[in-house]
Structures are given as structure tokens and as C-alpha cells.
Image (cartoon, grey):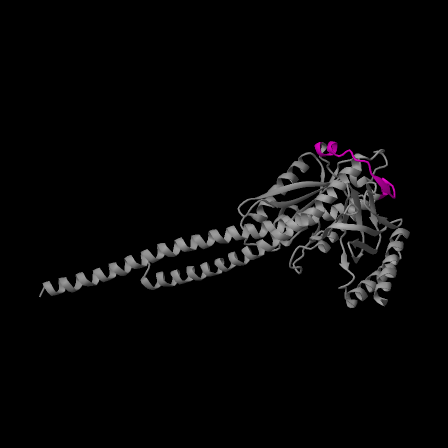
């Protein structure tokens, strides 16, 4: 059995760890609220954008001349995967869930003989992926300096993707991110953004006539690159809310576990203190009896 | 009452403005300024850098936009834009900076004509804002 001093030291160290995790939980909770708010504020934009694109593409008369961003290159050989993770750790399974999802997808691709290119957004994803997929990673972007997810950063990523698409570096683009459901659950998502997947059911609903100025093709050509940035931005917002939620619940767990540990150690400490006292008493009594 | 329609301006980060008593909006559409009144035909168009003028009741507001998409449908005008600010509370330093950035973009040789046109428009509008 550990000596009383050792136990005391351990108790105090666990207690100070508990203080740290508790503080981190508080910070995450505050940040989560903000992240959630901005995710909600960002929703109308992407919804509107989606609606307009749906309306446009359903009214598109000639599929042949439609922009490549919508219809794809006609091939499916080279896949670009954008894996979006956090820049910081200590947030439970947040990063590894995305990576797991992405790796499963990568495996499917390589099994079917497709070429894989990866862009990682966020340093944690890069750290985990570079061990196995070092040669596939073509770009690593990290926004450590910017505090909150902002559109400007998302636009940078979007422009990079479009530039690569125009240089014919890939055929299909998929992004990976965590969708925020609630504090406890975040769902890792894969979403194909090039060529754009259009939900057939929704297309049927909108049979509106629009006047276009200039013509449809030009509007679509202008709109689709913006949509890429918007989708990336949406993913970034979801991700930052998920990251904080995930960190909050992870830190909450850690705090609770530390509390349990402190309780256990305190009981052990008290028992051994009592045992030591009892032992001393017995020694005194038996000493007195022998006289 | 009957002359009013709804206006919604959203940016990626938030819903910028929401009004339901708008009587006229003038937007800098790509092919020239476009005034929109109630019961306009459904239209989709996109914007070049310029000024959006919003008339509602007896007040008039002006906003600067970089780019954007306009959709008008069922008397709801939605404007999606990534960069917008109210001209009343714009600050000159920020505008100066934007002019400088745009001008440095212009010096890029590789620009195609369309982009060049848009950026020079932007410089023009910003400069006129600054002189006021």
C-alpha cells in the first residue's frame, strides 16, 4: 500500500487536473454557444444559394453546354478529398471520427483503382493522415490565426479547389466534415461538391419560370464557384460547432472521472490513515499489557 | 400598403437585413442598374460592385456590395452577397484599403477582361464613395 504522503500528492495532482479540465469545459461551452449561433446565422445564405441553383439547373435546357462544375468532367478517375478537421486536440473523438470516415472512403477508392488526392484543412487531420497517405496529400491548409470560421478563409479554400478543377487535376471532389447535431452527437459527413449532386425530389417541386439576366449559363458559371465556397464555409461552421461540442463533452467526462478518482483516493487515504492509527494503538496497548 | 414588398439581404455570416415595407430597390445588376418594384417578374441576376439603394416608407438606405446574386420571386427579393456594408457607417480607412487591394489586383497581367472590368468598376465606385 502506498504511503500516506504519496496518496496525498496524488490526490492534489488529480485535483489540479480536474481544475484544468473544468476550465476547458467552461471555455468550450462559451465558444460552443457562439459557434452554434454563427452556424445558425449562416444557414439562410446556403439555403438560398441551394434553392437558386436548384431552380436554375432544373430550368437548364441544354445539358451539353452546362458548366463542368455542375455536370462533371464526364470521368471519375481522379478524386480530390478535402478533409476538414480542427487545429487543436483534446476534443474527444472529433478528429479521429472524421479521419476514420475519410480513411474508409480512401480505401474504397483505392480498391476500385481510382487516383486519390487529398487536401487537409486543419493541422490535426494532416498529422494523422500523413503517416499513411503522405504521397497523396497535395495541400495542407490551416487557419490557426483566425479565431472564428469566416467566409474569407472558406473562399480561399474554394478558390483553390476551383483552380485545381480548371487545371483538370481532378474529376470528383468530396469534402469531409462533422455535422453538428447536438453536444453529444456529431455525425461525420462525406459530401460530394463537384460535380454537384442534386436531390431529385426537390427538383421536381420547383417549376418556376424565371427571367435571367444575363443568360442561364453565365449565371450558373458565376454562381457555382460561389456555391463551392459556400459549401466549404458551411462545413467550417458545422465543424467549429462540433469541435466545441465534442470538446465540451470530452472535458465534462474528464472532470467527472477525475472527481471519481479523487473520491477513491480519498477513501484509500483515510483507510490507511486509520489503519496506521489502529496499528499504533495496538502497539501501545500490547506494550502496556506486557508490563 | 399595396406597393410594398419584402427584402432580405443575407451574407454568409449572418442575415444582414430583413424588411417587409420596401417600395423600391435599385441594384447594380451585371448588365446595368435595375430598379425593382412590387410585382416584378421572377428574375435571377447577379451583381457587380456598386450601390444598392433601398426605399422603404420615407427612409432611403444605401449599401455598398462587392458581388452577389439577386433573386426576385413572389414579391420577395433576396440578395446574397459576400461583402456588404452600410454607406452611412462606412469608414474611410477601410475603403482606402479596399481601393489599394483592388488596384494591386488590377496590375495582375493574367486577368481576363471580365474580371478586369469588374475590378475597375469596384475601384470607381469606391473612389466615388470616398470623395463624398
Residue A85 point in image, percent of width and height: 63, 50
Residue A130 visible in rendering: no
Q: In the visual, does B130 lie left or right of A20?
A: right
Residue B105 visible in rendering: yes
> Which of B103 and B55 lies nearest the eye of the viewer?
B55
In this view, B88 is above or below B113: below
Q: In the visual, does B58 lie left or right of A255?
A: right
**Can you tell which quarter of the image residue B60 is in?**
bottom right
Instruction: Locate the C terminus of chain B by quadrant.
Output: bottom right
**Can you tell which quarter of the image residue B75 is in?**
top right
As for residue A206 lying within the magenta part, the answer is: yes
> Which of A59 and A188 lies nearest the eye of the viewer?
A59
Q: In the visual, does A114 lie left or right of A215?
A: left
Residue A41 point in image, percent of width and height: 66, 51
Count the labels in the image.
0
As drawn, the residue found furthest toward the left would be A291
> Which of B11 and A130 lies nearest the eye of the viewer?
B11
The range drawn in magenta is A201-218
Residue A91 point in image, percent of width and height: 55, 52
Q: Residue at x 35, y 56 (%)?
A: A265
> Which of A275 and A132 lies nearest the eye of the viewer?
A275
Residue A153 point in image, percent of width and height: 71, 55
Q: Residue at x 78, y 56 (%)?
A: B58
As for residue B131 lying within the magenta part, the answer is: no
In this view, A114 is above or below A163: above
Amino acid at each position: 500500500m502506498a504511503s500516506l504522503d504519496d496518496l496525498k500528492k496524488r490526490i492534489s495532482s488529480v485535483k489540479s487536473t480536474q481544475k484544468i479540465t473544468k476550465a476547458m469545459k467552461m471555455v468550450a461551452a462559451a465558444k460552443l454557444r457562439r459557434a452554434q449561433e454563427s452556424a445558425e446565422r449562416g444557414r439562410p445564405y446556403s439555403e438560398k444559394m441551394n434553392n437558386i441553383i436548384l431552380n436554375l439547373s432544373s430550368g437548364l435546357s441544354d445539358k451539353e453546354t452546362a458548366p463542368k462544375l455542375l455536370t462533371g468532367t464526364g470521368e471519375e478517375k481522379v478524386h480530390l478529398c478535402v478533409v476538414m478537421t480542427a487545429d487543436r486536440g483534446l476534443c474527444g473523438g472529433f478528429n479521429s471520427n472524421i479521419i476514420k470516415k475519410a480513411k474508409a472512403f480512401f480505401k474504397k477508392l483505392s480498391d476500385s483503382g481510382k487516383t486519390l488526392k487529398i487536401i487537409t484543412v486543419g493541422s490535426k487531420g494532416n498529422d494523422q493522415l500523413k503517416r499513411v497517405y503522405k504521397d497523396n496529400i497535395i495541400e495542407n491548409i490551416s487557419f490557426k490565426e483566425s479565431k472564428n470560421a469566416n467566409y474569407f478563409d472558406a473562399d480561399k479554400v474554394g478558390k483553390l479547389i476551383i483552380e485545381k478543377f480548371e487545371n483538370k487535376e481532378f474529376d470528383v471532389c468530396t469534402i469531409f466534415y462533422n455535422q453538428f447535431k447536438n453536444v453529444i452527437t456529431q455525425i461525420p459527413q462525406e459530401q460530394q461538391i463537384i460535380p454537384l449532386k442534386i436531390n431529385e425530389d426537390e427538383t421536381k417541386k420547383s417549376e418556376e419560370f424565371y427571367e435571367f439576366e444575363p443568360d442561364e449559363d453565365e449565371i450558373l458559371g458565376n454562381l457555382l464557384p460561389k456555391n463551392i465556397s459556400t459549401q466549404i464555409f458551411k462545413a467550417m461552421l458545422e465543424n467549429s460547432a462540433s469541435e466545441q461540442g465534442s470538446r465540451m463533452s470530452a472535458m465534462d467526462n474528464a472532470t467527472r472521472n477525475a472527481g471519481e478518482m479523487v473520491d477513491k483516493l480519498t477513501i484509500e487515504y483515510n483507510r490507511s490513515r486509520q489503519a496506521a492509527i489502529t496499528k499504533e494503538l495496538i502497539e501501545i496497548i500490547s506494550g502496556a499489557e506486557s508490563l | 400598403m399595396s406597393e410594398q414588398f419584402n427584402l432580405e439581404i443575407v451574407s454568409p455570416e449572418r442575415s444582414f437585413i430583413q424588411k417587409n415595407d420596401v417600395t423600391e430597390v435599385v441594384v447594380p445588376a451585371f448588365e446595368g442598374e435595375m430598379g425593382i418594384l412590387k410585382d416584378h417578374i421572377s428574375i435571377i441576376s447577379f451583381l457587380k460592385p456598386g450601390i444598392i439603394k433601398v426605399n422603404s416608407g420615407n427612409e432611403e438606405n444605401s449599401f455598398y456590395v462587392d458581388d452577389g446574386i439577386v433573386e426576385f420571386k413572389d414579391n420577395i427579393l433576396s440578395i446574397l452577397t459576400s461583402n456588404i456594408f452600410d454607406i452611412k457607417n462606412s469608414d474611410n480607412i477601410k475603403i482606402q484599403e479596399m481601393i489599394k487591394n483592388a488596384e494591386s489586383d488590377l496590375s495582375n497581367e493574367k486577368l481576363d477582361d471580365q474580371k478586369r472590368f469588374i475590378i475597375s468598376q469596384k475601384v470607381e465606385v469606391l473612389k466615388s464613395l470616398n470623395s463624398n
